[in-house]
Image (cartoon, helix red, strand yellow):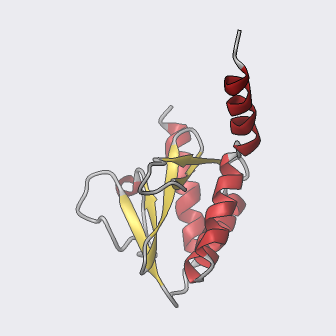
Amino acid sequence: MADKKTEVAGATAAKDAKTASQLIDVKITALADWRGEMLARIRNLIREADLDVIEEVKWRKPSNPAGVPVWSHAGVICTGETYKDKVKLTFAKGALLDDPSGLFNSSLEGNIRRAIDIEKGVQIDETALKALIRAAVALNTNSR
């Protein structure tokens, strides 16, 4: 039988529990600058490109308590990280995707991942980004 302290701790943990989508909302709000706006825009484009996308938050740790937003569909599609000077969208299997618009501009040396670094004031090609997202979903679903 649980003692009173354990029951209270459990109730507090349950009350504080948030879905991954809620945690991403909190992260976007906490940024309160262009990075939050860009992360929100990217998130909306991902949701538009894949209606079945699953939002997750991974790699939560003391140095990054908010964790990293992750979008998945039959495997990881991409992650959205924020740094002081950029928002980085990393595609888990980006090296296997065609990128005719040249969106990938980071992590180009690897055999698997590719990333898009977006700095303040940069406009992203929304059509090309949605095409990359759809291609990543197709790669994930076809490789199962």
Q: Please state the horizontal and vertical placement of residue 90, each as a whole percent of the image.
A: 43, 60
Q: Is residue 61 visible?
A: yes
What number of labels is visible? 0
The correct choice, above or below, for 17 with respect to 136 in the image is above
Judged from this view, the residue extending furthest toward the bottom is 121
Q: Which residue is situated farthest in the left direction here?
A: 109
Could you say which quadrant of the image residue 9 lies in?
top right
- Residue 46 visible in the current orientation: no
Between 10 and 78, the one nearer to me in the picture: 10
* Image location (x, y in percent) of residue 4: 73, 22
The image shows residue 4, relative to residue 137, as above or below, that is: above
Viewer-closest of 114 and 132: 114
Eyeballing the image, is 128 above or below 114?
Answer: below
At x 37% / y 53%, what residue is drawn? 96
Residue 114 found in image quarter? bottom left
Q: Quadrant of residue 141?
A: top right
| Residue situated furthest top in the rendering | 1
- The image shows residue 55, relative to residue 103, as above or below, that is above
Residue 86 % position (x, y): 44, 77
In the current view of this chain or complex, which residue is farthest to the front?
4
Q: Nearer the viewer, residue 76 or 38?
A: 38
Task: Give the x, y percent position of residue 61.
Answer: 44, 48
Quadrant that contains the N terminus: top right
Q: Residue at x 60, y 43 (%)?
A: 73
Q: In this orientation, which residue lies closer to the viewer: 97 or 3? A: 3
The answer to whether 101 appears left or right of 72 in the picture is left
| Image position of 5 (left or right of 79) | right
Which residue shows up at 54% across the image and 80% down it? 124
Q: Residue at x 42, y 62 (%)?
A: 98
